[in-house]
Each structure stands twice: as structure tokens, then as C-alpha cells.
Image (cartoon, rainbow, N blue to C red):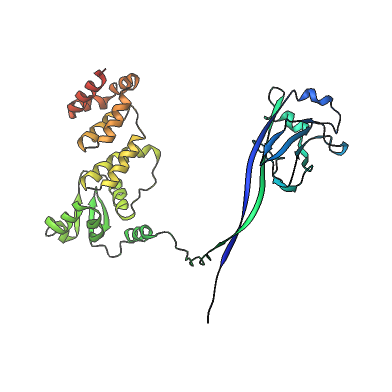
Amino acid sequence: MSSSASASAIVADKVSGHHVLKIDGFLGMMVLPSGESVTSCPFTVGDHLWRISCYPKGKDLWHREFISQFALIGEEQASFFRKKNKPTKVASRIEKFASKGDSWQCLTFIKRTALVKSKYLKDDSFTIRCDIVVFKKSCAQEGAAEPAPPRSVSVPPSDLSHHLSGLLETGKGADVVFEVAGHKFFAHRWLLAARSPVFNAELFGAMKESDVAAGVVRIGDMEAGVFEAFLGFMYTDSLPEMAKKEEDAMYQHLLVAADRYNMERLKLICEDKLCKRIDASSVANVLALAELHHCRDLKDAFFEFLGTPANLREAMATDGFEHLSTSCPSVVKELIALCSAP
């Protein structure tokens, strides 16, 4: 059995151009009776001569409520279309073939009352743009047959985080329990070790023979809600929704936890969130965090905020700024040097 395939294309040679016609003194043209027009100067597109005619009171009595537009061709065969600069509800695209002496007609281009009320009539004038495409000739070209497109299969988005989230919620297969501020959280050592090099060392290293062997790991210096959000991020790579009033404190606590367990992506997410929530009331606390946990971008963002005298005065009036001067004197010195620079 034999088969063959071939392909060809018809290519049209075309030339395009446009003409802009500005009509001044539109209201004065209302003295013209229906059927009379004003005509543009001649212009050339594709070696053909063209003119645009505007009938302020319509081409005939049946269309006297409208402004009518005509595009007149001077010679030979052409195809063209017209469009307004900014389309309105009455604007349209119309295509036709025309021969010498023929014209494209739009008898209901726009109602005069609509134009008067529109934004297109300014200082008693409006502008029409006429776009023309002239097809000069067509020719056939041979070409290789295009292969049939490969079949495709619809692939749903990844649902790994959904499954891992379910694993955390049910606690199925959990082999370690965290005790945080009186609350217990069941988790899986293999996942935590894969996500955090610190957990990897603690759960399968030094702590293996002590608390981990007993199945309980106690974590101090962290609130239960913060650890719950932190644990959820380790399973799903996303943070839970939280109330607006809780966001500042939560992002600060999570930044500390991320740095403690070497979760770099979570740390950067918290930095980014805090950068977008800069205000005078939190600047001292966050600057201290940025210094202690080596967050250079976050620190620079707050220095930029404090570069405005009004922001600096407001921040210095808070209790947190006094604490900053005692807990991180190097930051205050750096800030003074920055503000003193010419």
C-alpha cells in the first residue's frame, strides 16, 4: 500500500495604508441639505486614487438622522475596509470588492445626536480614520505537507500538596509528636527531614536516642499557632489564610522559625510580606529581626522607609525604637550614619 501527500498555498500580495480626515466646524455643516457632502483631498494607497466623502445629513432622506460615509476608488480593482480610531457601538468593519468608480458606503455611520453627545466631538470637530488594504495579485506556491498534529492528553494540575495536606490532617503513618505550648502535633519524620536540614539532623541524628525515640519532641519559644502554620508550610509549601490584624506578628514569628530550621523559601516569603507592610509602629521590631536573622533586603527596605524625616520621627517616638537601641545598637549606628550622609 502506498500513499502520497502534498500541499500548496495561495499567497495574496497586498498593500495597506490609511488616511486621517479631520472635520472642523461640524455644526456649521448642518446647513447642508440631505444628500450633499464634503469630500477629502485625494490620497493614494496601492497605486489607486481615493477620496472620502462625508454626508452630514445622510446620503438620502431615508438616512437623514445619520452621518453617512463613502470611500471612493479612482481606478482598477481593490479590496478595502474602514475603521474608526476608537470603536463605538455603531462602529463596524465592512469588507467588499470595488472596481473603478465604485465606492464603499456606510449610510448609518453614526447618528448625529449620538456624535454630539459623544467624546469624539471636541471643539466642534471630529476625526475619521480610513484604513485601506489593496490586494494586487495572488499566486500559488508549492509546499511540503504539514504533518498531523500529535494527539494531546489533558493533564490536571499537580495535587501533591493536597495529598500531603490530607496526610498531615489525618496523622496517618505519623511517627513523631511535637509538643508546643501544651499542644500536640503529629507529623512524619521522613517529610520533615526532606524539607529541613535541621530537622534531618535532629530527627535522625543527635535526638534519635532521646526524645525522638520516645516519639515526642518538645519545642519551646514558639506559639502553637505559629508552629501549626510552619508545619502546614512544610507539607503544602503554602501559608494558611489569617486575619489582617494577625499578619504582622505571624510573619515575624514565622521568619524566626524559618531561620531556625533553615527553611530559606519560607524566610524569603516572610521578608517579602513584611517589606510590603512597613509602618512606624513595627519598624523597630522588624529591624531587630532583620539584623538578628541576617535579612539584608528587609533591613534595606526599612532603612529606606526611615530615610523620610517624618517617618523617622514617628518611629523614634515608639517604645520599640528605644528597645532597638539597646538590643541592636549597631543598627541604630548604621541608621544614624545613613541619615547623616549627604
Pick the residue in front: 166 or 118.
118
159 sits to left or right of 32: left
Give the residue drawn at x 16%, y 59%: 204
* Residue 271 in the image, given as x and y percentages of width and height: 30, 39
Which quarter of the rendering shows the C terminus?
Answer: top left
130 sits to left or right of 99: left
Give the residue drawn at x 76%, y 46%: 99
Give the residue drawn at x 54%, y 74%: 4
155 sits to left or right of 301: right
Where, by quadrant of the figure, is residue 119 drawn?
Answer: top right
* Residue 183 in the image, given as x and y percentages of width and height: 26, 51
Give the residue drawn at x 67%, y 45%: 134
Pick the residue in front: 133 or 83.
133
15 sits to left or right of 291: right
* Residue 17 in the image, given as x and y percentages of width and height: 64, 39
> Looking at this rendering, what residue extends furthest in the right direction?
61
* Residue 110 in the image, given as x and y percentages of width and height: 75, 36
Where, by quadrant of the figure, is residue 68 drawn?
Answer: top right
